[in-house]
Image: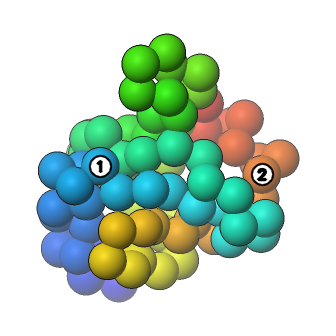
């Protein structure tokens, strides 16, 4: 599955896709880059409020312009950089 996820996420950084946490359906930021097997997520383009480095293995599903992570809002702190 990791290979399929990597292939399907290729253009999401280019599109600045929105990132949503499945448990709360809350947007936590946008994809800005890929780094190895992780995605760089930044909340706030002008004033960076939060930055996350989340493994691609946590991706639950993708739509045209959104990525859904299978993590809880409270567990976001462990991915914050």
Q: Give coordinates of residue 9: x percent, y percent.
A: 26, 66
Q: Residues within 10 Å of mark 1 (few under 14, many from 20)?
A: some
Q: Secondary structure at mark 1?
A: loop
Examine the rendering and report whether any part of residue 78 can be seen. yes
Circle 1 is placed at which residue position? Answer: 16
Quarter containing the C terminus = top right
- Toward the front, the furthest residue is 46
Q: Is residue 14 left or right of residue 1?
A: left
Q: Secondary structure at mark 2?
A: loop
Instruction: Classify 10 Å Cα crowding around label 2: few (below 14), some (14-19), many (20 and above).
Output: some
| 59 in relation to 54, above or below | below
- Between 58 and 28, the residue placed more toward the observer is 28
Residue 70 position, x and y percent, is 63, 70
Query: Could you tell whether 11 is left or right of 5 in the image?
Result: left
Kindly identify the residue that appears in the image at 42 percent across and 67 percent down: 66
In percent of the image, x 53 and y 77: which residue is there? 60
Q: Which mark sits nearer the N-terminus, 2 or 1?
A: 1
Residue 52: image location, x then y, percent: 52, 36
Q: Is residue 48 above or below residue 31?
A: above
Toward which corner of the image does residue 23 lie, by quadrant? bottom right
Residue, disc 2: 73
Q: Residue at x 60, y 47 (%)?
A: 28
């Amino acid at each position: 599955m990791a290979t399929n996820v990597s292939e399907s996420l290729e253009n999401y950084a280019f599109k600045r896709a929105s990132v949503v946490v499945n448990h709360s359906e809350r947007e936590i930021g946008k994809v800005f880059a890929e780094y190895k097997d992780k995605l760089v997520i930044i909340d706030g383009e002008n004033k960076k409020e939060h930055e996350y480095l989340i493994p691609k293995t946590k991706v639950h599903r993708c739509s045209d312009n959104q990525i859904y992570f299978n993590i809880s809002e409270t567990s976001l702190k462990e991915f914050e950089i």
